[in-house]
Image (cartoon, grey):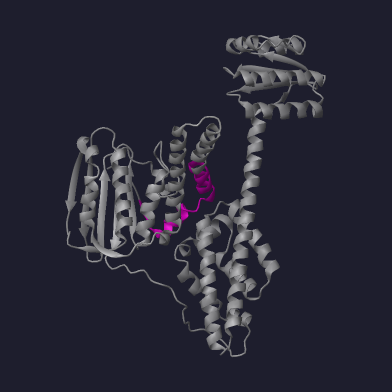
Amino acid sequence: MKDKYQEQVDSNNHLSQLASVGQIAAGIAHEVRNPLTAVKGFLQLLEHENKSDYISIAQSELDNALTTLNNLLQVSKPDQEEEEMQSFFITVELESILNLFQDKLYRIHVVTQFKDTDNMFYGKKNQFKKAFFNLIKNAIESIEGKGTLTISHLATRDELIVRIKDTGVGIPAEKLTLLGTPFYTTKDHGTGMGLTQVFSVIYQHGGKIIVDSEEKKGTTFTIRLPKQYIPQKRGVKRLELDVEERSTIKDFFIANRDKFEKGLLSEAINVRDKIEEIHTMGNINLLNNAHKLAMFVVEEHEHELISFAKQEGVAWAKYSLTIAFKLEWVQAIRRTLWDFLYNYKLATNSNTSLEEFFTLEKNINQLIDQFMNYFFISYTKYKDDLLYSQRKLVENLSVPIIPISSNICILPLIGQIDHNRVATIEDKVISEIGNSHIQTLIIDFSGVADMESEVIRSLLNLINGIAMMGCKTVLTGLRGEIIKKVIHLGIKLDQAADFKGTLQFALKDYLAVNIT
């Protein structure tokens, strides 16, 4: 029996995949920056050379950047692609899409198993065609050499089911949960936006996706769509609440705490099953915190709300909790707040004027938005500080200055040395010599195979600087490739450094011990 991993990804779980703010931001920066950098370069060339080729290349790169941004916009705000809902036969669209790949199918055996083809689906046809196109394209591209692509369609009483199965390279089990995340891809060249569009379209229509994959054996995408899916527009709910005619809004919320929780959980369908998990991971009580936020909002305690937002930001960042859950949770609090305020007005026979109503709406929305703003500022700052400290740790580990006596230290260099690492070495060495009063620094290059000429020049300049601080440099383990480049550069270091063949010889001479 094959060891298969089956992840039933629905709209609840997929929100967590879209929550990686750092990954999405990095993806946007990479996918858009590269073509824009190319455009900038060609525009600079046009200042000196009037070649039409430069204009066409720059135009092509701009189109790539705009396509990336447009794809992301359609996924994040799918309603902006204004397409009317219509009835269509899924099997007809699948067959038409297969015809687009005739030039790819000469090496692939295609099997179609279409049943219940007279069942129509009501939705946005063009978005579905694009989704099925992406799935079939990915399946074909995953097959190295010969293989089989199987596409099936059937109907149950409540659902339409489409399966797209390939005998391709498969997907590692630990990577399955990342499928559909913007800019995550298993391909060498790709943005991951194709699968993001697929997941988004299916979920917009109330469907589910099951991914079954095994490395070197293939992948199956199963799409389950409800036959009668009609998007529901949400209105304000009338609730059975406990309220006295002259009770304050604070008293009203306190008296209906349980019903507030019930309403909140009905709104936050993706988070409610994660409440215990989040409490276990980060000791965060979502329900208690929801009541706290609601009271800060209705009582307009702005200062307390901001402080609470900052605390929450640190807590969620510290334990790397999924941001999408926080977004949904706060938006659910916002919607539940409005339901309660509406029912409070009905119960207390409040004759609120139109101006008072819009003022209340503005204040509530501003406070909720302010909470989210400070939450994300705090969350991002914590993450940035963590990344900075980790980067400094890595930098220190890449320049390990090891004391072997009161005034002699060793700096063993290993791996590739580029301009950034030279700058780190310079900062660390100069600082350590000044702070520790090092008189002899032994720099061992036995772990460095080669370096660029400009990097060598920078290191030699650093050695001259070390001498200016009254510290003697001893270089060991220099390889022939590096020596040739030093000779080619024409730089003499006789006065600034001593040279030893190996680190052992240097230690023997400078510590007067016999190292074997």
Where's residue 154, x and y in %? 20, 57
Q: Is residue 48 visible?
A: yes
- Residue 460 left/right relative to 17: right
**In front of the other: 10 or 508:** 10
What's the residue at 66%, 21% (across, down)? Answer: 412
Q: Up-down: is 40 above or below 321?
A: above
Q: Up-down: is 433 above or below 182?
A: above
Q: Specify the principal SS of the magenta part.
A: helix
**The N terminus sits in image quarter:** top left
- Residue 93 left/right relative to 337: left
What's the residue at 23%, 46% (across, down)? Answer: 98
Q: Is residue 317 magenta?
A: no
Q: Is residue 27 magenta?
A: yes
- Residue 36 left/right relative to 13: right
What's the residue at 19%, 43% (across, down)? Answer: 110
Q: How many marks?
A: 0
Q: Is residue 220 visible?
A: no
In the displayed orientation, state which residue is furthest to the front.
50
Specify the quadrant of the image occupied by residue 468: top right
Q: Up-down: is 507 above or below 162?
A: above
Point out the stretch of residues depicted in magenta: 7-31
Where's residue 384, x and y in %? 63, 46
Where's residue 401, x and y in %? 71, 25
**In front of the other: 243 or 349:** 349
Where's residue 216, x and y in %? 31, 36
**The C terminus sits in image quarter:** top right
